[in-house]
Amino acid sequence: MLEIRPTAHADIDSLKQMYVSEVEDHAERAEAFAEQLTTKFRTLLALHDGRLCGTLSWDTRGGYDDGVVELVGLGVSSAYQRRGIATKLVERMIVDASQFYSDSGYALRTIILFMERKNERARKFYSQTGFSEVAKIPRLYPHDDAVIWVRHL
Ligand SMILES: CC(C)(COP(=O)(O)OP(=O)(O)OC[C@H]1O[C@@H](n2cnc3c(N)ncnc32)[C@H](O)[C@@H]1OP(=O)(O)O)[C@@H](O)C(=O)NCCC(=O)NCCS
């Protein structure tokens, strides 16, 4: 069964393990990843039968009246990809961000995100999920340009 819920401090160890098995075997960076996801951003976790298999981090951008959020990070463990988990994480982020803005008397209007230009898998995902690729920032990342995607609600 798939559960999607906000992260909590108790998730730090699972997040570190996910980083080590999915990204790189580097304890300090795994620690920083887990710390960022639990303290810096608003993060949603996907758990399959209680096992962590995906994360999505987001944050507001600009004033509340702008109604803009940035999707800061999204990842699904390789063994769980192509099962609709990232799609469900994005849908839940929209629900939570819409609630956040309506609680303050405003509305969520736009989601933006930055992506490495050569990330073809993510390009296919975002183009299937209602986002449009709108701009390029040359050399934003150490080894690639960035592209900006936008979804208006
Ligand atoms: C991009 C990513 C988050 C997608 O996660 P996912 O859970 O597999 O995505 P979904 O199952 O919800 O995919 C929805 C649709 O996106 C498209 N899509 C997703 N991954 C795809 C792939 N590898 N190849 C082609 N199309 C793909 C498909 O249209 C898919 O629908 P379908 O499976 O019915 O054909 C995942 O591949 C990932 O974690 N990649 C590594 C990290 C990353 O690049 N994150 C984004 C950085 S900005």
Image (tube, rainbow, N blue to C red):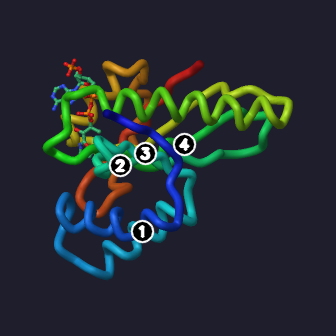
Q: What residue sits right under mark 3 in the picture?
A: 56
**Residue 19, image x and y in percent?**
27, 64
Crowd around label 2: few <14 · some 14–19 · many ≥20 (10 Å): few
Q: At 22% across and 41% down in the image, what residue appears?
A: 119
The label nearer to you, 4 versus 2, is: 4
Tell me the quadrant of ligand 1: top left
Q: Residues within 10 Å of mark 3 (few under 14, many from 20)?
A: many
Amino acid type shown at disc 4: Glu
* Residue ID at (56%, 21%): 152
* Quadrant in the picture for the N terminus: top left
User: Which of pointers 2 and 3 lies earlier in the amino acid sequence?
Assistant: 3
Residue 81 at what x, y percent from top left? 19, 36
Q: Position of residue 41 (x, y in %)?
A: 55, 56
Could you say whether the residue bearing mark 3 is in a helix, strand or loop? strand
**What is the secondary structure assignment of the residue under circle 4?**
strand
The residue beneath circle 4 is 70
Against 104, residue 83 (above or below) is above
Among numbered discs 4 and 3, the one appearing first in the sequence: 3
Foreground disc of the pair 1, 4: 1
Q: Secondary structure at mark 1?
A: helix
What residue is shown at x 41% (from left), y 23% (from top)?
132
